[in-house]
Image (cartoon, rainbow, N blue to C red):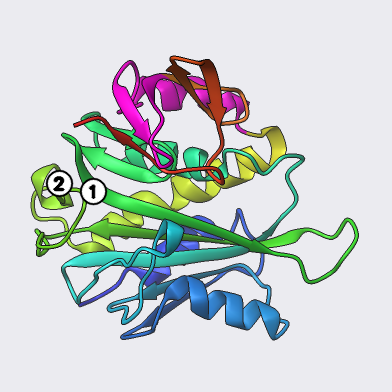
Amino acid sequence: MLWPAEAVWEGVSPLLPGFTVEILPQVDSTNTELMRRARAGRSEPVLLVAEQQTAGRGRLGRGWRSGPGGSLTFSLGLSLAPADWSGLSLAVGVSLAESLDPAVHLKWPNDVWLSDRKLAGILVETASFGGGEAPRYAVIGVGVNIAAPQATGLSTPPAWTGEILAGADAGQVLLRLIQPLVQSIKAFEALGFAPFQARFDARDALRDRAVVLGDGTAGTAHGTTESGALLVHTAAGMLTVTSSDVSVRPAA
């Protein structure tokens, strides 16, 4: 397919000096590839798009299926130095959801949902190569279903952009998402998650719903804190859950 690489570059390069766009027909994982490059000393801002991933992955090591035309998989790599990294994946989700459709919601901490089905996933990874107070290199990976995927074996039923953006291919969806995403990441770097909190809560798919944490604890979700932690009211009181602690899912 034809990718709008030049249009993407024109939209993003004023925000990220030295920015480049690269399209690969196949790679194991765009996140993995950018981390390999960063370890080798290549930490320039780059958008890496793969038409197909052979070992795509999501949070907690879960796989992400992708095939040519059926999905959009990309990773944005750049140096960042926010005062607090908490909530970055939520801010990314807010940007994606707002760029897609009013009907799109967010499932804490890193999934984009449409009618309780997974439309997109986010995987944020960071690494420090300079030591001290040097900015960390952040790789922000996004996978979006463009066409209806094979649902067999998926823990959450899938949704796809064809349901809300009729006729839009992966390149058109990328062009729709990328500039607002970079703007949101820069805003997060400057201001943290707080400016995104109300926007996340407005699209929170878990708000006031019964949920079960990965350790089996049951409760009711009550939105997020200013740092992006999930508040869950349980029999033992209010828990503040960070994304590194446990997974969370709606109760059956």
User: Is residue 181 placed above or below 57 in the rendered structure?
Assistant: above
Can I make out residue 100 in this image? no
Q: Amino acid at mark 2?
A: Leu
Q: Residue, x 48% and y 19% (percent of image)?
A: 198
Separation of residues labelled 1 and 2 (CA atoms):
12 Å
Q: Is residue 199 inside the magenta stretch?
A: yes
Say which of 153 and 13 sits in front: 153
Q: Could you say which quadrant of the image residue 8 lies in?
A: bottom left
* SS for dot 1: strand
Residue 93: quadrant of the picture? top left
**Residue at image x 16%, y 51%?**
158
What kind of residue is marked 1? Answer: Leu
On screen, residue 50 versus residue 232, left or right, reads: left
Horizontal and vertical percent position of residue 227: 62, 30
Query: Is the residue marked by circle 2 packed among few (<14), some (14-19), or many (20+) residues within 10 Å?
Result: some
Which range of residues does the magenta coloring cover?
193-221
In the picture as drawn, the residue positioned furthest to the right comes out as 132
Q: Give x and y (percent) for residue 111.
A: 35, 45
The image quadrant where one finds the C terminus is top left
Residue picked out by circle 1: 119
Residue 177 makes an appearance in the image: yes
Question: For the image shown, how many numbered marks are present on the structure?
Answer: 2
Q: Position of residue 250 (x, y in %)?
A: 27, 32
Crowding at mark 1 (Cα within 10 Å: few <14, some 14-19, many 20+): many
- In-image side of 62 versus 92 (left or right): left
Say which residue label 2 marks: 165
Which residue is at 24% across, 35% downward? 101
Q: Earlier in the sequence, mark 1 or mark 2?
A: 1
